[in-house]
Amino acid sequence: MTLSLAAYLSFKELWRNRVRFLLVSMVIALITMLVLFIAGLGEGLGTANREYLENLDAQMLVFRDKSDYIIPSSRLDNSIVEEIRAVEGVAEAGGIATSNVAIILADNEVLKVSLLGVEPGYPGSPEVTQGQSLRSETTNEVVIDQNVIERSDIQVGDTITIRSTQGTEDQTYELTVIGVTDGQSYTFQPSVFVSYTTWDEIRTKSDAEIGRASQTINVVAVRLEDPDEIEVVTQRLSSQISGSMVADIPTAIQNVPGYSAQQGTIQTQGVFTLLIGILVIGGFFQIQILQKVPQLGVLKAIGASNWVVGAAAVVQIVMVTTLGVAIGGALTLLLSLGFPPTVPIVFDGAAALLAILALLLIGPLGGLVSTIYAVRIEPLKALRLS
Amino acid sequence: MNISAPIALEVRQVVKTFQSESGAINAVDGVSFSVRHGEFVALVGPSGSGKTTMLSILAALLTPSDGQVLIDGQDLAHMGEAERVRLRREKIGFTFQTNNLIPYLSAKENVEFMLRLNQKLDKVGRLRSQELLARLGLSDRLGNLPSQMSGGQQQRVAIARALIHNPTLVLADEPTASLDTERAFQVVKTFAALIHENDRAGIMVTHDLRMCQYVDRVLQMRDGRLVNEYSTRDEILALAKGE
C-alpha cells in the first residue's frame, strides 16, 4: 500500500510539473553523457594502449632486469629465447621487438604505426582473421591490424610503403600485406607485424646501428604449459635466466608508459563528475523539499505515514534519475555512431553498465538528505505555517 | 443537534505546558468539554488564548502534558506515533487556513486521496467524492488543480476532503481566514450543514465571531482556559452580532 500510494503521489507530481522535472532529467542526461563519454574514452584509450598485450597468447613477459617492466626500456639478447624455452613449465616462448614507423598512404598521407617484430608461429605473433599468417622463411611480408584498414584503404595483397628513419635520413621499404589481424593496437597506434628479420631491416635505427644485424629484442612472451603455475614458473625463470625480470600480463599493461597515469586521470574525472551529479541532484531536491514543507505537513496531518512521504520522495528521485540516465544513454549512443575510428571511444559492456549503475545511484544518493528532511517534517507545520 | 447523540469527543482537564526562557507556560490550562455526534462547536478567543494548541492536541499532532482526550472512547495519550497517524487518517477530517490542498492533485483527486489513504477508494467512493463536490457547488471544477480555483473553492474542496471518509471528528483551523465576507459565510454555512447531515462532530477555530451564527455551541478561551460557553441560540446569535 505504501509503495503504491508513494508511486501515485510521485507520478502525479511529476506529471503535473513535467517541464520542471524534465529540465532536471536533462541535467542528469548531460551528466550521464559526460560520465559515459569519460568511461568510453578511458576504455578506448586503455584499449588502444594495451590491446596487443591483452590479446597475447601468453601468460607472462620476460623483461631485462631493472627495466621497471617498461617494454621500450627492456633490451634482451635474442639468444635468451632459447634459454627460456628450456625452462620447465614453459610451453613456448617468442621474442618481441618494437619500433615506430609510418605507412605512406595515397596523396603522401602518413599513418603512424607500431612496428612489431615477432617470431612467426610463436607467442607474440598475431592470429590472422584474413589472409595468411607470417612465415619465417620469407621476408618483406606484413600482417596489418584491422585498425590500419579502418584508417586507410589497404587490403590483403597490396604492397605498402613503410618509411623509417635510418640514422638521420628517411628510408622507404616495400612490404606485401599477406594477412589481417584484429584487436592489436599498441601504445595508441595501429600495429603492423613483421618477422624479426624484416623488423631488423626496416626498424628505425641510429647511425651506429645501420648495417649491423641486431641480436636485440625488447621482451619475450611466454606461454605456460599450465597457466595456474604462473608463480612457480616465474620463480624458475627469475632464478634460471640471469639479468631478467618476469611480469604477468596485467603487470606489464600497468607499466606501459603513461597507461596508469592516464587511466587514473580518467577515473578521477569520472568520479568527480559523479560527485558533481550528486551535488546537483541533491541541491535540486533539497530546494524542492524546502518549498514543499507546508504541503508535506498537510500530508502527514491528514494521516500519511512517514513511510509514504519518504517513499514518495525516493520514488520521485528514482523516476527523474532513470529518465535522465535513459535520455543521456540514448543520446550518447546516437552521438557515438557518428564518431570517426580515430576517436578512441569504446563502450565496453561492463564499463558502460558500471557507469550507468553509478549514475542511477547518484539520484538516490543526492536526494538522501532531502528524503531524510522530508521524513522529519512535523505535521504540526501544516497548522503553524497555515 | 440531538442532545442524546453519543459523545464523539471528550476532553478532560487537558494541560499543555511549554518551556520558555521565562519558565513554564501553560498554553492550555485544565480545559474540559465534550462534543456530540452531529454537533458543530466553535472555539473562539483572542490570539494567544490557546485555540490552536488545543486544536493541535485534538488533532493528535501534539501530546497533552496532562489530562485526557478521547475520540470515540480512544485515549490519545496512550497512543504511539503509528496509532496517532492511523487515528488522524481514519477518525479525523481536517481543513486548514491555507495550503490546504495537495497542489498537484485535482479537486476530485484531493478528495479521493483521503479514501486512497484509508484504502477505501472504489467505484462507490469515487461517486461519493463527485457527489460531495457537486453538493459544494464544484461539479464543474472536478478536474481543476488548486491553482486553478479561487480561495473559496479551495476551502470547499478541503471541506469535502475532511468529510469524505466519514471521520468522527472534523477540525477546521480558521477556515475563513483567507476569504472575503460573502465567501466566508457561504463556506461555514455549507460546512455546518454537512456536519449536521453527516452526523459528524465538528470543531472550528475562528477569530471571526460572525461565523459563530452557524454553530451549535461556542467555547471561548482566554489565557489557555475555557472562560465562557454559549449554548443557547440567543446567546450565540448575540455573540455573532457582537452584542
Image: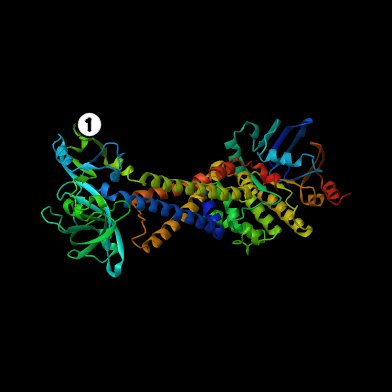
> Which residue is identified by label 1?
A235
Count of labels in the image: 1
| Residue A138: percent from left, percent from top | 12, 56
Q: Which of A328 and B39 is in front in this view?
A: A328
Q: Is mark 1 on a helix, strand or loop?
A: helix
| Residue A131: percent from left, percent from top | 16, 60
Question: Where A233 falls versus A211 (above or below)?
Answer: above
Residue A102 in which image quadrant:
bottom left
| Residue B61: percent from left, percent from top | 66, 39
Question: Where A146 falls versus A372 (above or below)?
Answer: below
Residue B35 in which image quadrant:
top right
| Residue A140: percent from left, percent from top | 16, 59
Label 1 Cα crowd, 10 Å radius (few <14 / some 14-19 / many 20+): few
Amino acid at the residue labelled 1: Gln
Looking at the picture, the colour scheme in use is: rainbow
Identify the residue at horizontal 68%, vertical 44% (top origin): B37
Q: Residue furthest front?
A: A208
**Residue B215 makes an appearance in the image:** yes
**Residue A57 makes an appearance in the image:** no
Q: Residue furthest bottom?
A: A107
Chain containing the residue with disc 1: A
Q: Residue furthest left?
A: A137
Question: Residue A79 vs residue B69: left or right?
Answer: left
Identify the residue at horizontal 34%, vertical 51% (top origin): A349
Q: Which of B218 and A281 is in front in this view?
A: A281
Q: Which of A347 and B141 is in front in this view?
A: A347
Q: Nearer the viewer, residue A260 or B140?
A: A260
Question: Residue A192 vs residue B104: left or right?
Answer: left
Question: Where A69 falls versus A346 (above or below)?
Answer: above
